[in-house]
Image (cartoon, grey):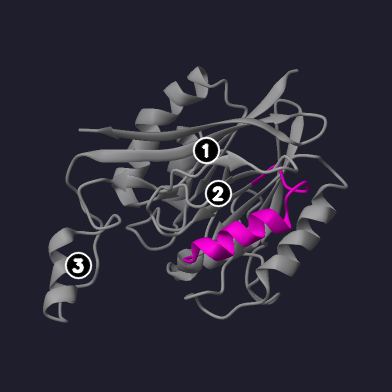
Amino acid sequence: MHSFNLLLVGDVVGSPGREALKRCLPELRERFEIHACIANGENIAGGFGLTVSTVDDAFASGVDFITSGNHVWDKRDYRDQLANSERVIRPANYPDAAPGRGYGLIECDGVRVGVVNVMGRVFMPALDDPFRIARRLVEDLRQTTPIVVVDIHAEATSEKTALAYHLDGLASAVYGTHTHVQTADERILAGGTAFITDLGMTGPSDSVIGMETKIVLERFLVGTGERFAVAKTSPQQFCALVVNVDRESGRAVSLHRIFQRYD
């Protein structure tokens, strides 16, 4: 069987995250014979939102497609770009009037891959039902390709896990983003859907989920503090999941979780 190999990269945080992409992606793409790389980029510009230059950096480093989350609107200048982008999407359960789309298609190595992005509702801003919307979009995309992946940007592990079971046998992979903490629960469900609760963070390791430790501690200890800022210190980390998918059925056949830390 000739598998299609996906590299799913956890939330890319600021310039340390972009540097990690440049440093790690070429070697990982070669080692795992990656055909398509999908990264969550909602924190790629200074930890909050996206810009044209930071998105271009990610694509130049080897990312093929970018998903996002609640920070997608943080850089107002990027909203017009989002409305016209075919390779950057926002969560599909935002209102229809929101710029951009919540799904997309890419073609790599002669294979089309559907990508769906939804946001959870537990401990998150109130949006439309991610379960109903994700299922509808996955079913629609499967009319075009058997390989469809879903990024659920959410806080609650239960919500992410439930969505994976809801889409088992339909999606090739369902994976969580947002918490910036990688989980060690990667598995393939009975119907052939790969799942991990959270991919983790690609960015500064010596930090509080990517942010400067001193500023975060001031918030917790004193209730004051500056605006959160991306930590610039070493070491850095790269978090991802490799999913090998059967090209004909779209079922996941094997997984490899990646957590790399380096100075």
Q: Which residues are magenta?
A: 155-173
Q: Earlier in the sequence, mark 2 or mark 3?
A: 2
Q: Nearer the viewer, residue 132 or 169?
A: 169
- Residue behind mark 1: 63
CB atoms of marks 1 and 3 within 8 Å: no
- Judge by depth and name the residue closer to the eye, 199 or 54: 199
Residue drawn at point x = 65 percent, y = 54 percent: 164
Q: Nearer the viewer, mark 1 or mark 3?
A: 3
Give the image location of residue 130, x and y in percent.
66, 68
With 220 as the anchor, is 173 left or right in this view? right
Q: Quadrant of the N terminus?
A: top right
Distance Cα–Cα, label 1 vs label 3: 30 Å
**Which quadrant would the C terminus be assigned to in this image?**
top left
Q: Is residue 89 above or below residue 202?
A: below
For residue 170: magenta? yes
The residue that label 2 is drawn on is: 66
Query: Camera-side residue: 58 or 188?
Result: 188
Asked if residue 163 lies in the magenta stretch, the reply is: yes
Q: CA distance from mark 1 to mark 2?
A: 7 Å
Q: Residues within 10 Å of mark 1 (few under 14, many from 20)?
A: many
Report which quarter residue 27 is drawn in.
top left
Q: Amino acid at mark 2?
A: Ile
The numbered dot on residue 216 is: 3
